[in-house]
Image: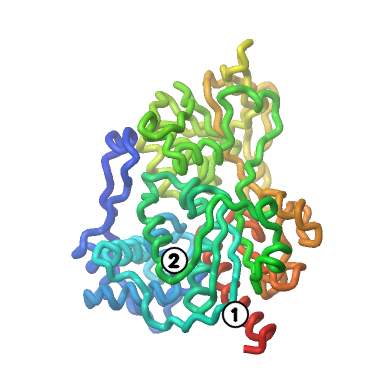
Amino acid sequence: MRGGMRNPMPEQPADVRNHNFEEVALGYPEDTAVDEAQRCLNCKNPQCVKGCPVNVDIPQFIHALTERDFDGAIHILKNKNSLPAVCGRVCPQENQCEKHCILGIKGEPVAIGRLERFVADRARENGTDMVKEGLAPKNGIKVAVVGGGPSCLTAAGDLAKMGYDVTLFEALHKVGGVLMYGIPEFRLPKSIVQHEIEQLKVLGVKIMTDVVIGRTFTLHELLGEEGFQAVYVGTGAGLPHFMRIPGEALNGVYAANEFLTRVNLMGAWKFPKMATPVYVGKNVAVVGAGNVAMDAARTAKRLGAENVYVVYRRSEAEMPARKEEIEHAKAEGIELHMLNNPVQILGNEEGWVTGIECVRTELGEPDASGRRSPVEIPGSNHVFDVDMVVMAIGQGPNPLLKHTTPDLVTNRKGLITVDEKEETSIPGVFAGGDIVTGAATVISAMGAGKKAALEIDAYLKEKLGK
């Protein structure tokens, strides 16, 4: 109980890691993790749990860590969080649990995320992270989970623990959603995601890949002839947005989703060992400033791009990406070109990108989100000479489910509308995560999956009289 400065995270040197896809952050050694845990003040009225979307008992797992009770620590974590090794790596703790840490008022908060990662990694390596207690006997009631991302993985696991016969349907050839196709290997090793999926199988979850709900089966077919008593939809927000400026159809222009999916899910970073090629330019512009933009920029650098520019219409202070990711990107040689708004992408006669024309901006009054609005400066147009552009300006829901299920109510953005119990307009069909909220964090999607599992359990007990 001493506070003080928090322990730095060991990591690969920047000039080494920007040429490989190995994990950047290397994790705390045991003694460092225990030392960091001992910084916790053991507050009488801890605030950190308020910032956790799945309500992990943070003080208890940290206390167990100070006692070197590693089995107890993972048990406490897994009681609420089914993917601690994932969350410890990719959750924005600085805006969640750590934001509320009392130590952060005058100094640095306890590194809760790093400790979560340490506990989860140690348990995985020692084979002690499988939750075996509190499992209900199987009841034979079928529940379908549509999607394979963090929300669905959480819902499927919790429902299986409650005794339900769960089948998870994934449209792609691998389960994991954004954890597999979106987040690069150097931030989240895929072996960790696969380990968590194997644990679902141990719990009895059936996994069916290459199944597109809306094509292979409709929602009503799942509830009808397929015999499912309830359905959870967590298909995420994977449809990329574009700026609708001239030149977006040129060769060499990617949506960030396509670029990252080719590299992460389909193994393009291992080409030619893997059969998926990916075009990477010599000079690359990434439009956007969120975590996806940072992932795309850092990936392009690792694939051999000489110059990678992040182009954003606001200043660095307004960038929505995690500060840690921005600092990592800059250290790896990514150039930030702030206060620039693209107006067109230029190309040659063969249809390939040759440049991106931008207009300089200045910041005006705050908009509805609280960020200062960019105002274009007339006559400030200029061109970045690039041969590849990645659009990373957000994504929305795939419209397929709505098109094949007219009675599924959505809002004007195409997001599924749910009530306070996460139930949709179709009785027995629940939804959560990015398909309901729009693109958000991994752990907020997990929180929705956890809540949905409880609501589905209550719904089925009432429906079936059990």
* Residue 63 in sight here: no
Please identify the quarter of the rendering in which residue 140 is found: bottom right
Judged from the image, the secondary structure of the residue bearing numbered disc 1 is helix
Task: Please identify the quadrant where the N terminus is shown.
Answer: bottom left
Q: Report x, y in % for residue 414.
A: 73, 53
Work out whether 182 lies above or below 54.
above
- Left or right of 300 on screen, residue 439: right
Identity, as a three-letter code, of the amino acid under mark 1? Asp
Display colour scheme? rainbow
Q: Where residue 200 is drawn, which disc sits there? A: 2
| Horizontal relation, residue 73 to residue 326: left or right | left
**Which numbered disc flags the more N-terminal residue, 1 or 2?**
2
435 lies above or below 265: below
Callout 2 amino acid? Leu
Residue 428: x %, y % from top left: 70, 72
Measured along the vertical axis of the image, is residue 349 above or below residue 177? above
Nearer-the-camera pick, 208 or 393: 208
Give residue 267's position: percent from left, percent from top: 42, 38
- The residue depicted at 55 percent of the width and 41 percent of the height is 257
Q: Residue at x 52, y 52 (%)?
A: 177
Please give the name of the residue rendered at 66% of the width and 43% of the height, measured from the top-left corner.
Answer: 373
Q: Residue furthest top?
A: 349
Q: Going by the picture, which residue comes out furthest to the bottom?
A: 465
Q: Residue furthest right?
A: 406
Q: Which residue corresponds to mark 1? A: 457
Nearer to the camera, 293 or 160 = 160
**Separation of residues labelled 1 and 2 (CA atoms):** 18 Å
State whether residue 318 appears in this view. Answer: yes
Q: What is the x, y in percent for residue 198?
A: 40, 62
SS class, disc 2: helix
Q: Quadrant of residue 271?
A: top left
| Foreground pick, 127 / 139 | 139
